[in-house]
Amino acid sequence: MTSTLMPASTGELTRDEVMTALDVVLDPELDEPITDLGFVQSVTFRDDDVLEVHLRLPTSFCSPSFAYLMVSDAKDVLTALPGYDAPGRVVVELDDHHDSERINAGLAADAGYRGTFGHEAEDSLDDLRAIFRRKAHTAAMERCLTALLRADDELAEADLGTVTLADLPSGDHATDALLRRREALGLPDAADAPVMVDATGRTYATEEVPMALRRARSTRISIDGNAHFCRGLLATRYPGSDADQAPREPETFFPLTTLKEQLR
């Protein structure tokens, strides 16, 4: 089953504008847009002037908290579109999840995360976002630093602590991704700002750098591996949905045959 995206527009809003708006909604664990992952099941402009969007996930047992984040974020960005900020103008629902009914009802009632899950909501949405923003930054940082190591045979791991943002290739996909992750954490973006920092901006002593890089690489491999796996699961669960998935950027996912080498 592939995404149903019809009709093309209603009033001044177009289907492409809806999808562009949804581009900023990320799977919190995979750090990729739900549009790239193929998680948008359908976009429909109803006859009653309601914009209705349905989302789907790779399995019925994906984390309810992650699922709620994506559905909630999707509704937030769509209700920010011109003419769709009035109550009831936007309906976003999650299909085929074991908590679909609960999540959809909570979102329709504007009950919020804790109102939807009650005592089961162990962490706030802000807590969850902070955890995954830190992981996303770590992975983006590692991608940039590993690319530098591969491009310069004379650059040693221990020297990575001296690398600054100015040393990264301007306009590069990995560089741009890192800058966005740093902005989300409130980290400096000055040209002389060190690249290798933790989520609080703390730098690493020379002797700490190799182990810090290894930990960051483990985080990145976990994220990339999960993303690759989830794409496959979605395509298996919804035949043809792979056509709705955007190709991944080069070097985003490293083949499993190289994982041991990367972890050395």
Image: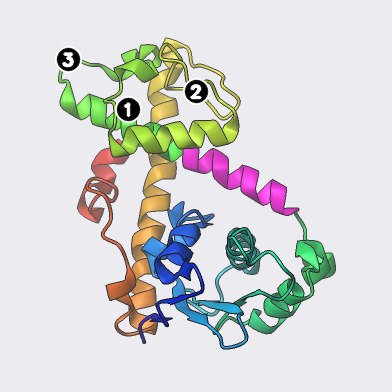
Q: Quadrant of the N terminus?
A: bottom left
Cα separation between marks 2 and 1: 12 Å
Q: Quadrant of the C terminus?
A: top left
Name the residue tied to disc 2: 197
Q: Residue drawn 17% across and 26% down?
A: 151
Instruction: Decide: few, some or many residues near mark 2? Use Cα within 10 Å; few <14, some 14-19, many ≥20.
Output: some
Q: Left or right of 111: which side holds 228?
A: left
Camera sees residue 215: no
Secondary structure predominantly adopted by residues drawn in magenta: helix
Q: Are marks 2 and 1 in contact (CB under 8 Å)?
A: no
Q: What's the distance in space between the residues labelled 3 and 1, CA to CA?
A: 14 Å
Amino acid type, label 3: Glu
Identity of the residue furthest to the front in this view? 11
Type of amino acid at the residue the image marks with label 2: Val
* Front position in the image: 6 or 132: 6
- Image quarter for residue 2? bottom left
Dot 3 or dot 2, earlier in sequence = 3
| Stretch in magenta | 124-137
Tell me the residue that label 3 is attached to: 154
Q: Position of residue 153 (x, y in %)?
A: 15, 20
**Residue depth check, mark 3 versus mark 2: number of the one nearer the observer:** 2
Is mark 3 in CB contact (under 8 Å) with mark 1?
Answer: no
Residue 79 placement: quadrant:
bottom right
Most foreground residue, 85 or 25: 85
Earlier in the chain: of badge 2 and badge 1, it is 1
What numbered label is drawn on residue 56?
A: none
The dot on residue 145 is 1
